[in-house]
Amino acid sequence: MIKAIVTDIEGTTSSISFVKEVLFPYAAKAFPGFLDAHWQDETVQALISAAAEESGQTLETPEKASALFQQWIAEDRKATSLKALQGMIWKQGYQNGDYTAHLYSDTAKCLKQWKQHGLDLYVYSSGSIPAQKLFFGYSDEGDLTALFSGYFDTTSGHKQEVQSYRNIQADIGLPAEQLLFLSDVEAELDAAAEAGLRTIRLDREGSQGVSKHQVVTCFNQIDVANLQERPTAD
Ligand SMILES: CSCCC(=O)C(=O)COP(=O)(O)O
Ligand SMILES: [Mg+2]
């Protein structure tokens, strides 16, 4: 039996456009001011050092660092340092009421039903864990953080790598075949399946074509009461 669900955010619980057209531009615009104000903070400096190492650049001024992060945002780079800094910047936007996090109309209802059915719920996103908590804490449907038993980000590994799902499975502490991973990205689902997880692809627009995985267009189509485990290969 499936005992826990691990869900992606962008394209799965929530629209890609909210992330790309609201969150990313907000962070890009706020980066220069944020880095000016927090340049001496120990945590920020550690993240700048990580970004300098990853990029091979010397980031000795807030201006140089801002330029790099703005380039990475434009490229949708999933760098852990960028994601941590974005999370810090988005906090202010959520707290000011500049936006709430988009959820598809079925998301909150189904997450609540699945939880009520006895399933443990987890998030796995490239957004940092603090950013994920803000996302579900300030969602269109209010604070949903109580529904989740845990959160995973790129500190568990990148989403298209098999080892990331092995790490997550070990942290959750359930056999891989009792975990269901939901995502809109085929390569993420392939990696999760290779680690032994059950997978379902979300095709929210109904336009993504063929998949090796079960495909649904909304969470309502996932019948958790009848979800079979992935057969174990032996
Ligand atoms: C925590 S919301 C912002 C998500 C984000 O930064 C991102 O890059 C989207 O990644 P996902 O793994 O959810 O597709
Ligand atoms: Mg996604």
Image (spheres, helix red, strand yellow):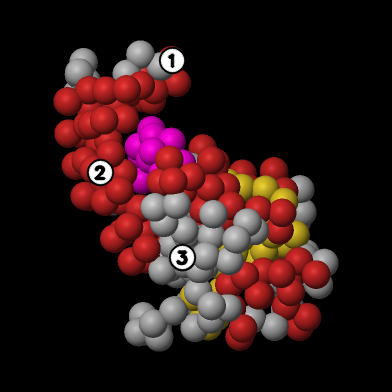
Mark 2, secondary structure of its residue: helix
Classify mark 1: residues with Cα within 10 Å, few (<14), some (14-19) or many (20+).
Answer: few
Which quadrant of the figure contains the N terminus?
bottom right
Q: Which residue bears the numbered disc 2?
A: 28
Q: Is residue 84 above or below residue 112?
A: above
Query: Does the rendering let one see residue 49?
Result: no
* Percent coordinates x, y for residue 216 in the rendering: 53, 83
Which residue does the image show at 32% across and 18% down from the upper left? 39
Can residue 90 be seen by looking at this rendering?
yes
Front residue of 224/39: it is 39
Q: Looking at the picture, which amino acid does disc 3 mark?
A: His
**Label 1 vs 3, first from the N-terminus:** 1
Residue holding disc 1: 42
Tell me the residue that label 3 is attached to: 102
Distance between the alpha carbons at the discs numbered 1 and 3: 32 Å
- The kind of residue tagged 2 is Ala
User: Who's the residue at 53% across and 40% down the image?
Assistant: 130
- Asked if residue 84 lies in the magenta stretch, the reply is yes
Image point (47%, 58%), residue name: 100
Contact? badges 3 and 2 (CB < 8 Å): no
Q: Nearer the viewer, mark 1 or mark 3?
A: 3
From what the image shows, is residue 153 above or below residue 209? Answer: above
Q: Which residues are magenta?
A: 78-91
Crowding near the residue tagged with mark 2, few <14, some 14–19, many ≥20 C-alpha atoms within 10 Å: some
Along the horizontal axis of the image, is 111 left or right of 216? right
Q: Mark 2 or mark 1, which is nearer the start of the sequence? A: 2
Q: Position of residue 102 (x, y in %)?
A: 46, 65
Mark 2 and mark 1 in contact (Cβ < 8 Å)?
no
Q: Which picture quadrant has residue 70?
A: top left
